DNA sequence: ATAACTTATAGTACATTTGACTACAAGCTA
DNA sequence: TAGCTTGTAGTCAAATGTACTATAAGTTAT
C-alpha cells in the first residue's frame, strides 16, 4: 500500500530515477556509467539509476541514488524528462524520471557502491550497449544538452574560474561537435559583454600567453532581465 | 503487485498525470479546468488529471484522462515536467507527470465526464484557487509556454488551418506584445518555407482578399532534421 | 463611374551580422 | 636569430534585419 508515514525505506516499485552525468575532459564529452552487480542486467554498464522512496523528494532521490552508486555527491541535477513506454523495462511496468548534470570530472572521485560493482567515465564515442531504454535516454540527453549549451551559458561551469578564449572555444567545439572560427568566436563572445577581462595572463605556456577572462554572471542576469538571450 | 499482463484497468497508485490545456481567445490565454465531483477536493476546480494504468503509455494516459474528464480528444500533448515533492498530495505519496498543449478553444466542445462534474475555460487572470500543487504546475507551464512560442511554431495551432499572413502576424503581435512590420514579417516567414500557399483567397472581406496559407509540418520536420531552428 | 479607403504585396536602401579569410604580434624553443 | 605556436586585429563579401516607399486589388461612399 501507498502510505506516507513509517515507510522511510519502502520504495515505489513502479517509479525509478536515472541520471545522466556529463563530464568534460580532454576536449571530449564523457558520460558517467555504473556496472550492475545484480539483477537481470548484471555485468552491463548502465546509467546510474534506482528506486524512489516514499518519503523522499524526487531530486533528493536522484542525488541519493547517484551518491550511493558512484560516490558523486552534491551536484546540481536538472530534470530532463520522464520515460514511460509500457515495454521499456522487463517483467514489470517502470516509469523513470531522468535527471542530468554537466560537471568537471576532475572534481569528483568515483566510489562505486550499493548495487554497482564499478563506476566509470565513458567517452560518448565509446559507450557500450546499454540496457532497457537507456540509449534512448542518453540520446535525448545529448540532444537536450547541445541545445541548452547554445542558449544558456552553462558551459562556463566546466572551465576554471579564469579561462582563455581558446579554452572556451574548445569546450564549445567539443560539446557541439564542430569546429569554430577563432576570430569570429572571439568577436561574438566579446560583443555580448559577458566576459570580464582579468588583469592576468596565462602562465607557463610555451607560446604567447593569452588573456584570462571571467564569466560575469551579474551582467548576464541583468541582460536577461532586459530580454537578452544567449546565442551561440 | 506490479505486473504487466491482465491488468488493463489496474492503476499505478503513486503516479498521476495532470494536463495543462492552454487556449487562446480574444487575445488572452485561457486554461482548461475541471470541477472535481468526488474525493477530498470535491467541488474545487483543478487541472484535468488522473491515474496511469499499468498497460498504458504515459502520453496515451494523458490523452485518455483528458478525454474522459473534458471530452477534449486527440490533441498534441507534450510533456512539461514531473512534480514529485513528498507533500504535494494529501494522505499518500503521488508523483505527477504534467503535460501541456496549446489549442483553439472554439475547436472543442467540452463534455465533462468521469469524476468531473464540470469543465470550463478560465482566463489566466481569473483562475480560482487550485488544489495540491496545481498552481505551481500552472505557473511553470505559463513560463514555459511563453518561451516556447518564440522558438517553436506552436502558434499555428491557434489559427484556422488556412490563414492569412496578417492573421498570423496579429497572433504573434498579441503573444509577444509588440508591433511587427508587415512586409518584413511576411518575408521572414516566407523564407522559412514553412507556409504552403493554398490556391484560395480570403472570402467575404471588405477589402482586397489575402492569400490563404497552411503550415507545412512535413517541411518543418525535415528542416528540423537539418538543424533548422524556428525563431521569432 | 469615380474617388476615397482598406488591406495585400512588391521593392528599395541602408545598417548590422555572419563567415571565410589574411595579416601580424608576441612569446617560446632550437 | 630563425622558426614555431598561439593570440589578436582586421578585411571583405554575402546574408540578414530594419525602416521605409510604392503600387496593386479590391470595397464603399458619392
Image (cartoon, coloured by chain):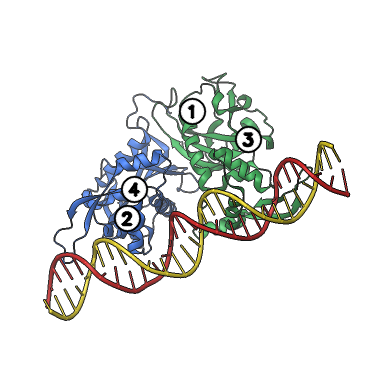
Chain colours: A blue, B green, C red, D yellow
Q: Looking at the image, is mark 4 or mark 3 nearer the viewer?
A: 4
What element does badge 1 sit on? helix
Residue under pointer 3: B67
Residue under pointer 4: A154
Q: Looking at the image, is mark 4 or mark 2 nearer the viewer?
A: 4
The Cα–Cα distance between marks 4 and 2, rounded to whole angstroms, is 34 Å
Quadrant assignment, res B55: top right
Disc number for residue A43? 2
What element does badge 3 sit on? helix
Say left or right for B122 vs A127. Answer: right
Is residue B125 visible in the rendered image? The answer is yes
Residue under pointer 1: B134
The Cα–Cα distance between marks 1 and 4, rounded to whole angstroms, is 30 Å
Answer yes or no: are tags 3 and 2 on the same subunit.
no
Q: Which of marks 4 and 2 is nearer the N terminus?
A: 2
Looking at the picture, how far across and down is residue A132, in whole percent? 43, 51
Looking at the picture, how far across and down is residue A63, in whole percent? 31, 40
The Cα–Cα distance between marks 2 and 1, rounded to whole angstroms, is 42 Å
- For the residues bearing labels 1 and 4, Cβ distance under 8 angstroms: no
What element does badge 2 sit on? loop
Amino acid at each position: 500500500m501507498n502510505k506516507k508515514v513509517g515507510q522511510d525505506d519502502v520504495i515505489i516499485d513502479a517509479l525509478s530515477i536515472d541520471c545522466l552525468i556529463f563530464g568534460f575532459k580532454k576536449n571530449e564529452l564523457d558520460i558517467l556509467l555504473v556496472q550492475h552487480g545484480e539483477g537481470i542486467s548484471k555485468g552491463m554498464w548502465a546509467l546510474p539509476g534506482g528506486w524512489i522512496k516514499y518519503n523522499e523528494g524526487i531530486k533528493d532521490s536522484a542525488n541519493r541514488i547517484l551518491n550511493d552508486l558512484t560516490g558523486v555527491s552534491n551536484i546540481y541535477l536538472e530534470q530532463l524528462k520522464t520515460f514511460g513506454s509500457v515495454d521499456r523495462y522487463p517483467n514489470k511496468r517502470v516509469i523513470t524520471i531522468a535527471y542530468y548534470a554537466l560537471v568537471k570530472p576532475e572534481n569528483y572521485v568515483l566510489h562505486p557502491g550499493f548495487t554497482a560493482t564499478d563506476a566509470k567515465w565513458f567517452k560518448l564515442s565509446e559507450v557500450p550497449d546499454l540496457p532497457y531504454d537507456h540509449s534512448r535516454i542518453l540520446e535525448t540527453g545529448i540532444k537536450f544538452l547541445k541545445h541548452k549549451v547554445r542558449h544558456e551559458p552553462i558551459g562556463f561551469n566546466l572551465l576554471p574560474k579564469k579561462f582563455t578564449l581558446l579554452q572556451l572555444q574548445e569546450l564549445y567545439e567539443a560539446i557541439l561537435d564542430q569546429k569554430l572560427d577563432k576570430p569570429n568566436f572571439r568577436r561574438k563572445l566579446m560583443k555580448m559583454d559577458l566576459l570580464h577581462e582579468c588583469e592576468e595572463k596565462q602562465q607557463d605556456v610555451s607560446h604567447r600567453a593569452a588573456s584570462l577572462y571571467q564569466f560575469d554572471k551579474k551582467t548576464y542576469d541583468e541582460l536577461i532581465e532586459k530580454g537578452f538571450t544567449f546565442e551561440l
